[in-house]
Amino acid sequence: MKLGNNVRKYRFENNEMTQQELANEVGVTRLTIHSIEKGKFAPSTLLALKIAKFFNTTVEQIFYIEED
Amino acid sequence: MKKINYLTLVVSIVMLCMIMVNTFTLFNAKVMIDNNKVINTGVSASVATLIIIVASLHFFGLVNLYLQYKYFKNVELFRTFTFVMGFFSLFFILVNVVMLQEIGNEYTMNHTITGEWNLVFLSLFTQGLFALLLFIQSFVTCKKLLNTKPVKKVKDESLFLTVHQVGIITAIAGFLLLYLVNNSMLPKQYVNGLLFMLSVIALVPYIIVASYWLNSVRKTRFIDWFDEKQLSDVSRGALVTLAISVSISVVFYFLSTYNIMINTTIYFPLYIFETLLLFSGITFYLSKKSI
């Protein structure tokens, strides 16, 4: 089981926001946002909640479990 | 930023010219000394003046590289390498001065001058290399300044990555210096002292950049020093470094027990550079792995 996400989709729906802009909003580096979108890094609960809160949605809408 | 960068471009060309003039002057002096001819006293004054100017321009170049980093806030291997080369070049200027003093003393006492000229020309080569790297870096930056605007970053990964880049380059330079000194024909009592001094010199760029990073985060809470991905990468890097460095230390222990490696003085500096290379290399790789 892996962690999938819709961060990139929500970013583009939000005025085509850049990774750096999202990183500035949630207080992490651009590399972290990039790694999350690529599925190379699983964010902490706090970071996942911050991202969801920024996009005005729930964590379950952005992050989901991918069955192998 | 544009004006400083254009100025650095000019400064690097001036440095290159001065280094070429110095090389030509010293080469002529060497030929005259080898042929037992008298050297004009004005030669030493002109060489000394050029050395002082070149050393001052080195500081200007290093400051410009720092300002480029502050402006772009990105990681560039070439800029990092040029920055580290600047420090080594400054060190070699000091070596140059000491060697020229030695040559002067031996010339006045009519002694045979042996390996000092090699170090003088090595020093001039290093200075020339730094001037060339600075020129290329400034030239490339001129073009970038036309197209790139600085980006606002709340949490900046570039300094974190630059520290590890400098760590990798410093460690490799340290290994090279250890190898050169250990395999030189110098007497053992000079080798041990030289190993210690060169190890400290090699670590200076890393210490400066790491101290700069520490200074930039010291006012924040410890948990905010690293981004959560950076913390994960540093932790994994430290774990792998511990495992590999302990294994290598065990190998060194058996080598010293069976007297396979004769000069045990290099073990500690070798351990320092090996640990630095492993930690910086692995952390940098993990940080960039997702790209």
Image: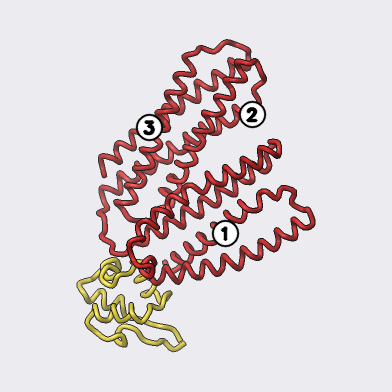
Chain colours: A yellow, B red
Of tags 3 and 2, the one toward the viewer is 2
Q: Disc 3 marks which residue?
A: B13
Of tags 3 and 1, the one toward the viewer is 1
Name the spot of residue A62 as percent of width and height, x first. Answer: 31, 83
Above/below status of A40 relative to B174:
below
Disc 2 versus disc 1: distance between alpha carbons? Answer: 33 Å
Does residue B102 appear left or right of residue B217 in this picture?
right
Q: Are marks 3 and 2 in contact (CB under 8 Å)?
A: no
Q: Are marks 3 and 1 in contact (CB under 8 Å)?
A: no
Q: Which mark is residue B275?
A: 1
Picture quadrant of residue B135: top left
Look at label 2 and name its amino acid.
Gly
Name the spot of residue B28 as percent of width and height, x first. Answer: 54, 18
**Disc 1 is attached to a residue of which chain?**
B
Q: Secondary structure at mark 2?
A: loop
Q: Secondary structure at mark 3?
A: helix
Q: Disc 2 marks which residue?
A: B115
The mark that comes first in sequence, 3 or 2, is 3
Specify whether disc 2 shares its chain with disc 1. Answer: yes
Disc 3 versus disc 1: distance between alpha carbons? Answer: 38 Å
Which of the two residues, A66 or B163, is positioned nearer the viewer here? B163
The mark that comes first in sequence, 2 or 1, is 2
**Disc 3 is attached to a residue of which chain?**
B
Does residue A19 appear left or right of residue B269 in this picture?
left
- Number of residue marks: 3
Which of the two residues, B144 or B185, is positioned nearer the viewer here? B185
The mark that comes first in sequence, 3 or 1, is 3
Above/below status of B48 relative to B167:
above
Look at label 3 and name its amino acid.
Ile
